[in-house]
Image (spheres, rainbow, N blue to C red):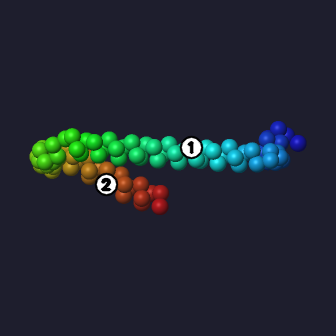
């Protein structure tokens, strides 16, 4: 029997009296706790920012900046060429590989 055959064989299960399952359960609980903590922190910071920042002025400035961005992107020949090339590559890839 070659070494490749030996390495491709599955190993026999090791009796660990549920240790592996307990460790995996602890890892899952830790990941869920970390995700919950991160989500709560983001919500808390967003809430504090909403209370502190002058939202009306911020929304007006954001709207003005978006209007300038959309107008400048809409009249950009470079962006139009890039979009055409990207679309062409997408359709070429679809035709070749599917």
- The kind of secondary structure element at disc 1 is helix
Q: Residue furthest top?
A: 3
Q: Which residue is mark 2?
A: 87
Residue at position x 88%, y 42% from top? 1
Q: Secondary structure at mark 2?
A: helix
Q: Position of residue 62 (x, y in %)?
A: 16, 45
Disc on the earlier residue, 1 or 2: 1
Q: What residue is at 35 percent from the left and 47 percent from the top?
A: 43
The disc at residue 7 is: none
> Could one spot residue 89 in this view of the protein?
yes
| Nearer the camera: disc 1 or disc 2 | 1
Q: Whole-percent x and y of residue 94?
A: 42, 59
Crowding around mark 2 (Cα neighbors within 10 Å: few <14, some 14 to 19, many 20+) is few
Residue 69 or 48: which is nearer the viewer? 48
Q: Is residue 54 left or right of residue 21?
A: left
Image spot of residue 44 (x, y percent): 34, 44
View extreme (right): residue: 1
Q: Which residue is mark 1?
A: 30
Residue 50 or residue 64, whichever sits in front: 50
């Amino acid at each position: 029997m070659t070494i490749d055959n030996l390495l491709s064989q599955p190993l026999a299960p090791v009796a660990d009296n549920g240790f592996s399952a307990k460790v995996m359960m602890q890892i899952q609980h830790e990941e869920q706790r970390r995700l919950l903590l991160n989500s709560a922190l983001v919500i808390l910071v967003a809430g504090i920012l909403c209370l502190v920042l002058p939202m009306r002025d911020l929304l007006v400035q954001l709207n003005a900046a978006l209007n300038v961005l959309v107008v400048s992107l809409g009249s950009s020949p470079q962006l139009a060429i890039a979009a055409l090339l990207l679309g062409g590559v997408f359709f070429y890839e679809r035709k070749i590989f599917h």
